[in-house]
């Protein structure tokens, strides 16, 4: 017996088994943002730690991989190693993807905050 509510979608009765994305619908927007951020940090850390072919030198330790992933996702730019010399092209591309997704998340969050506070964008000049 499923604990998730069933709903009628497109003429078919769907439960949680048929729609795995239904779990995400139970989060509030702030909870979703934090959960996505934690998921991104986890995937970035595991990727930097376990993916083969990302390094020219020795692998990063767990704490260094977490710091590098967090710095990339938060678009801070701090790293414990020189990204240009320590990572291969694939490793640099991986860090760049973390930066891109983190930047996209920040732009999305900023847009949501502006929209929810009722601040509109007006491109017309107020000079009359």
Image (cartoon, grey):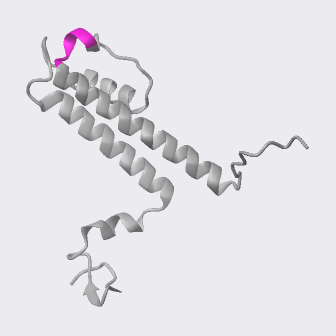
Picture quarter with the N terminus: bottom left
Q: Quadrant of residue 75?
A: top left
Q: Position of residue 115 (x, y in %)?
A: 63, 54
Left or right: 76 as drawn, with respect to 83: right
Q: Position of residue 80 (x, y in %)?
A: 31, 14
User: Residue at the location (48% across, 62% down)?
Assistant: 28
Dominant secondary structure of the magenta stretch?
helix
Q: Position of residue 65 (x, y in %)?
A: 25, 25
Q: Say which of 43 and 54 sits in front.
A: 54
- Residues shaded magenta: 84-88
Q: Position of residue 125 (x, y in %)?
A: 80, 42
Q: Residue furthest left?
A: 52
Seen in the picture, residue 31 relative to 52 is either above or below; the reply is: below
User: Residue at the location (25% across, 73% down)?
Assistant: 19
Q: Say which of 33 and 61 sits in front.
A: 33
**Residue 71 lies in the magenta-colored region:** no
Left or right: 104 as drawn, with respect to 83: right
Picture quarter with the C terminus: top right
Seen in the picture, residue 2 relative to 99 is either above or below; the reply is: below
User: Residue at the location (30% across, 33% down)?
Assistant: 97
Seen in the picture, residue 10 relative to 57 is either above or below; the reply is: below
């Amino acid at each position: 017996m499923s604990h998730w509510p069933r709903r009628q979608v497109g003429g078919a009765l769907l439960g949680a088994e048929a729609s795995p994305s239904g779990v995400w619908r139970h989060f509030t927007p702030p909870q979703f943002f934090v959960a996505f951020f934690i998921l991104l940090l986890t995937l970035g850390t595991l990727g930097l730690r376990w993916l083969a072919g990302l390094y020219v030198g020795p692998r990063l330790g767990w704490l260094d991989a977490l710091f590098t992933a967090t710095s990339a996702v938060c678009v801070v730019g701090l790293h414990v190693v020189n990204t240009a010399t320590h990572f291969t092209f694939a490793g640099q591309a991986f860090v760049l993807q973390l930066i891109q997704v983190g930047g996209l998340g920040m732009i999305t969050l900023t847009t949501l905050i502006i929209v929810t506070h009722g601040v509109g964008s007006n491109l017309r000049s107020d000079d009359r």
